[in-house]
Image: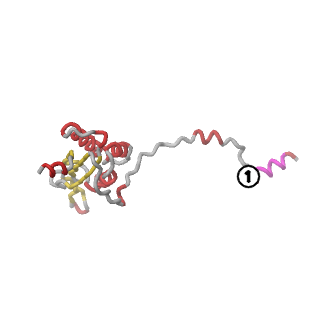
Amino acid sequence: MSDQIAEQRLEAKAHLRFARMAPRKLRRVADAIRGKSVREALVLLKFADVYAAEPLAKLVRSAAANAGNNHNMNSDELFITRVTVDGGPGGGITKRLDPRAQGRAYFKRKRLSHVTVVVSEQPPKTQPKRRGGAAIGLKKQPTRRVAAAATTSAPKKQSARKRTAAAGATE
């Protein structure tokens, strides 16, 4: 019996329920952080230019805190072993109407999501599959063009008409 307990993986969980975001948008970010270390995932989420990154970053920090406080795990060496994004009640709570032709109205489906993050000290046994939509864009820093404009101080080329006019004026 004690061998089974020793083999059991020690994990810490955190849940986010009724997130006011569609599961499809959250899954895109969840696929990008699945299997990574907590530190690497937090850096990725901090610089991701996606609206769904902020609630997932909070959830990963919460799972890491649960691991440290409740299970005496080392917070610096945690890995994200599982991330599940499930749909919540879609449309039963948040009803919105969309006006249509001839006085009709359609319901808009405002989706809700439930997210679970599981962290542990061992990396996941199998590497997650690479998915097509798992890439999240990073925020782009604006490039400064002032330095580039200062280096190009070469004289401008004159058009053929101006050159012939200037040559005719000197004669």
In the picture as drawn, the residue positioned furthest to the left comes out as 1
Q: Is residue 40 left or right of residue 111?
A: right
Q: Is residue 149 left or right of residue 56?
A: right
In the picture as drawn, the residue positioned furthest to the top comes out as 69
Q: Which residues fall within the magenta stretch?
A: 161-169
Task: Give the residue drawn at x 58%, y 39%.
Answer: 146
Task: Give the residue drawn at x 31%, y 42%.
Answer: 77
Q: Nearer the viewer, residue 52 or 70?
A: 70
Asked if 39 appears above or below 129 in the picture, the reply is above
Task: Give the residue drawn at x 36%, y 60%.
Answer: 132
Task: Give the residue drawn at x 35%, y 48%.
Answer: 50
Asked if 143 appears above or below 97 in the picture, the reply is above
Q: Main secondary structure of the magenta part?
A: helix
Q: Tell me which amino acid carries mark 1.
A: Ser
Q: Is residue 90 left or right of residue 29?
A: left
Where is residue 161 shown, x and y percent of the image?
76, 53
In which quadrant of the rendered view does residue 128 lie? bottom left
Where is residue 89 shown, x and y percent of the image?
16, 54
Q: Nearer the viewer, residue 118 or 140?
A: 118
Which colouring convention does the figure follow? secondary structure
In the picture as drawn, the residue positioned furthest to the bottom comes out as 102
Q: Secondary structure at mark 1?
A: loop
Q: Nearer the viewer, residue 164 or 157?
A: 157
Residue beneath disc 1: 159
Q: Nearer the viewer, residue 155 or 97?
A: 155
Where is residue 27 shown, x and y percent of the image?
29, 54
